[in-house]
Amino acid sequence: MTRIVNVTEVRNNVYWAAGGPRSGGDGLRALPLLGTLFHQAYAGLTGSDERVNLVRPLERADATRESWRRELASHAYAWHVAPRLEEHQSELQGEAAAVAAYWEAVRNLTGWLADLVWEQRNAGRSVSEAREVVFADTEREVSVKLTDDAWSAPVTVTGRIDALLRQPQTGALCALELKSGRTAPEADVCQAAMYRLLLDTDDVALLSFKPEPHEQRFASDQLKEAQTKLKALIGRLAGVVGDTNPPTANRQPPTETGQRIIDALHEGGVRVKLDGQPLTGPAFVRYFIDTEPGVRPDRIPQLATMLWTRLKTHEPPQISIERGRIVVDVEREDRQTVWWRDLRGQLAQPSKGGASRFPVGVAIDGSLHWADFAKPQDSHMLVAGTAGSGKSEWLRAAIASLLAQNTPATLRLLLIDPKRTAFHAFENSRSLYAPVVYPDDTEIAPLFAELIEEMERRYRAISEAGLPDLGAYNLVASDYGAQPLPRIVCFCDEYADLILADPKQRKEIERLVGRLSAKGRAAGVHLVFATQRPDRNVVTGVIDTNLMARVCLRVVKPAESRIVLGGEPGASTLLGRGDLLFKDLGAPVRLQSPYVTDEELAELL
């Protein structure tokens, strides 16, 4: 069966392996939103819509190069820059320097485009002809199927190319990667090598605006060398790299840490070898292990303590099975922070229908792992983690991601904060269902009872419309003369504090929570309960049965990990600070939570 790998996975893995944010070259940091707007400006200026493309402004300009540059810059501002900045004004508050750099980058882009078309004018082509000849396509989806004798299956690589230019003399295509702001050199070479694979061409260029224009071309030999490494990485990401016992002279020697793993396990009487090259994530490096015939894989976790003493890391390595392969995760000495702002560009823009999904965290390959409240397995969530695990920060990032993709018309938040420390940043949000709830001041049971009444009211409206759930109802609400209903998400930072203080109150709260969690999904009412105490006094039958999705950050005891993750160990050896295991269907997946700052929250709100 063919495996599929996306270009974004490959680039993200190279980015984190190179040092993450520290790997960036010169130039200003670009906001993801402004990067998206920059690409949209290029697509509009070079596209076929004559209302907004470059044809009319260049045709009406005086026949001088400078006049072309000025006219196209003015046109770009009026049609592509000003309207988009006004549309996203609230999201760009406090980012004056980034917005100024974005406009300067667009202005330099228009100068580059004007010069390109000017050359075609001197060759005897009209502006319209030059646009059709030179600008072949934007945002083209491409794919290529790769094979290798050492792979267990073919791999299809899919991706999107920013722009394609056509050489007027030969008709050959040139792949163009557009960047605004800082670039990461290693990732750039990787992207160029990827284009070489996807298009079977040596003509690849990186055009970056920092905001000054900088064009980088890559030599054929440079791309061939990078492509060899790239193909090996693709095989590892796809999980198709097996041990074909090549001659020792052709086998890449293990890293120092990899050799220590082999030696320590051999010392414990387990014969193993490394299965391919390691993958590097923001918090840890993942090594793949293959056992010799006759060795039971379950013996390896029993040697975790011995392995830890040989590796001499601050935190113990984590041993698990991913996609049928034994993996050993070893913490990085130079751990990287995953900033929420760097992921924001991958979030959906607010829309009439709203967004029900949000990123739980970043996977080892750099891709985002999503949860979706509209799906049964993710409709309600239990979040567990001890002090310092990053539990409150995960809740803040999840809320920020939901707010960034919704408006008050599509999302309402009910925030319960027993410790008065988790949700103060959201007190002025326009998306609150009610003011932030502090249990010392407000009784919780009546609040949940009110939420049940709202849930039942929605059920009646959805049933009368003959529809299955809130998502379907909102699509056709206007046909019934009704307004779409916002999704309601209740976040509670310390559920244990609600139920352990008073036995009578506990019984009532658990009864109400049981009704909400059993019927809430179809009505668009969802529960996200967090606790530092994931024991059987807190994770009772009601919670265990109905809150199916689990986010488990670092916990104190292995037994707590098993309670949260349905019998799965591992959370007690996590690294803290947002290192987590997520489980809904299937085995737990190890992820890194993004970190959102107070300044980013203030800007978002």
Image (cartoon, grey):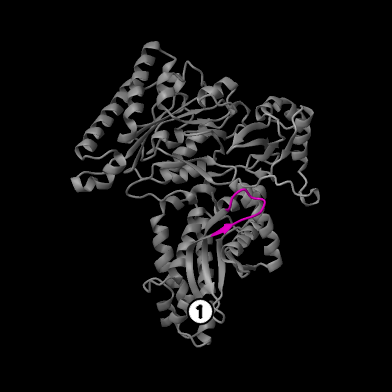
Q: Is residue 570 magenta?
A: no
Note whether 6 is above or below 577 in the view shown: below
Note whether 485 is above or below 57 in the view shown: above
Q: Amino acid at mark 1?
A: Val
Note whether 500 is above or below 54 in the view shown: above
In which quadrant of the rendered view does residue 289 lie?
Answer: top right
Q: Is 328 on the left-hand or right-hand side of 398?
A: right
- Looking at the image, which residue sits at the far top? 503
Magenta stretch, residue numbers: 144-154
- The answer to which of 145 and 62 lies nearer the viewer is 145
Residue at screen point 73% across, 32% down = 313
Q: Is residue 145 magenta?
A: yes
- Looking at the image, which residue sits at the far front? 294
For the stretch drawn in magenta, the main secondary structure is loop
Residue carrying label 1: 117
Residue at screen point 41% across, 51% down = 349
Circle 1 — which element? helix
The image position of residue 516, as x and y in percent, is 33, 27
Q: Is 176 on the left-hand or right-hand side of 270?
A: left
Count how many numbered circles sit on residues in the image: 1
The image position of residue 239, as x and y in percent, is 60, 45
